Amino acid sequence: MTASFKTLVGIAGIAAFVGAGCSQSMASHDAMAMASPSMSSSGTKAAALRTTLNNLFAEHVWLAGAATGAALGGRDADFKAAAAALDQNSVAIAKAIGSVYGSDAEQAFLPLWRKHIGFAVDYTMGVAANDRAKADKAVNDLVGYSQDFGAFLQSANPNLPKSVVADLVKHHVVTLKTVIDAQAAKDSEKAYAALRTAAGHMQMIADPLAEAIVKQFPDKFAG
Amino acid sequence: MKLTGVAIGWAIAVAAATTAADAATGINVQLFQFRPGTIAVNAGTRVTWTNHDEIEHTVTAGVPAKPAGGFDLALGGQGATASADFPTPGTYTYFCRRHQHMRGEVKVN
Ligand SMILES: [Cu+2]
């Protein structure tokens, strides 16, 4: 039940994303192209990897939205709990990376991943305090970060071009920023709609990542 | 890169002057890690870092909270190399300023 629910959410998110017809359509097209569909991706192990990554990345957005919503609502205890759960999700994502690329890569990935959460928190705090400079700096940091993240994945997997990954991460940032802005404006309806879009967008990262990994290690994911 | 260290036994070699690093004195910077993370060399050795990531890293003496100031090398992107000479025995830690979880150590005998 959970899986099909997430799939539906994913599809809805993609539809909203495509429907927006924004400049990101190039990036999503590239993302599709960079890991060409193959029979290997339909194998059980490949499907399991894809499901794992989709679940973890979607969870990342739900928990991030819960954390920023609590922060902007002034619910301290709630924020701390959400942030803690979000970090557990980060550790799980790093473990998934480690399961493919080894523990050294896992240890390098985790601080890098946590960094973008730190920037998102900075943005949230900037917005909450009406501190434009802080919010702008956080956005710049996040955009710069997308290059680092792209470089990391490209180093890990030549099937993941840095520029494509960076664009996808940028879009992740933009979709989450929309959530935070709506939360700050106390527009719950918009915030939750944006949260669904943001969570759905993660499939644009999880699917190509899973495809690229399967393509890189066809033997490991055969069958 | 501005070098602030004085008389602590560092000498910075010009990156362009270095040739391909040999296995014993070369450190690869890959997947946001220094590999190997710890290297042991004899005094007087020139150590060369080669960047395999398509992003800038630095090789900066010390630890983030306390840069040692001895050297601060920029590795501009994939394929970039930089070197430092280690004339004096000791243990030299270093990190990347852009990604401060990246740490390494040169043990000079
Ligand atoms: Cu670095």
Image (tube, coloured by chain):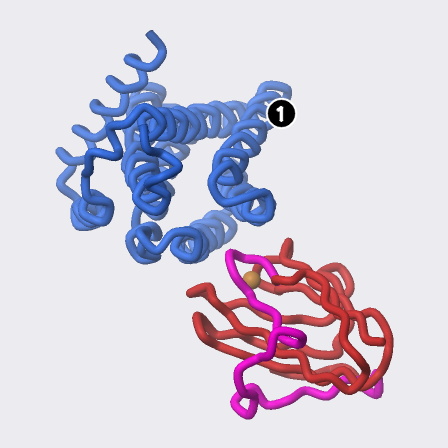
Chain colours: A blue, B red
Q: Position of residue A141 (x, y in %)?
A: 47, 54
Camera-side residue: B16 or A167? B16
Would residue A18 be counted in the magenta stretch?
Answer: no
Q: Is residue A119 visible?
A: no
Q: Is residue A105 visible?
A: yes
Q: Give the magenta part as a residue range.
A: B6-34
Question: Residue drawn 49% across and 34% down?
Answer: A96
Quadrant of the picture in which ligand 1 is shown: bottom right
Camera-side residue: B72 or A212? A212
Q: Quadrant of the N terminus of chain B?
A: bottom right
In this rendering, the answer to whether B69 lies above or below A117 is: below
Question: Residue drawn 36% across and 39% down?
Answer: A219
User: Which residue, as the protein is rendered here, is positioned at the far bottom?
Assistant: B17
User: Which residue, as the protein is rendered here, is positioned at the far top?
Assistant: A1
Q: Quadrant of the C terminus of chain B?
A: bottom right
Q: Which residue is mark 1?
A: A80
Would residue B31 be counted in the magenta stretch?
Answer: yes
Disc 1 residue type (three-letter): Lys
Q: Position of residue B44 (x, y in %)?
A: 78, 87
Camera-side residue: A152 or A193? A152
Left or right: B90, with B82 as reference point: right
Question: Residue drawn 49% across and 29% down?
Answer: A68
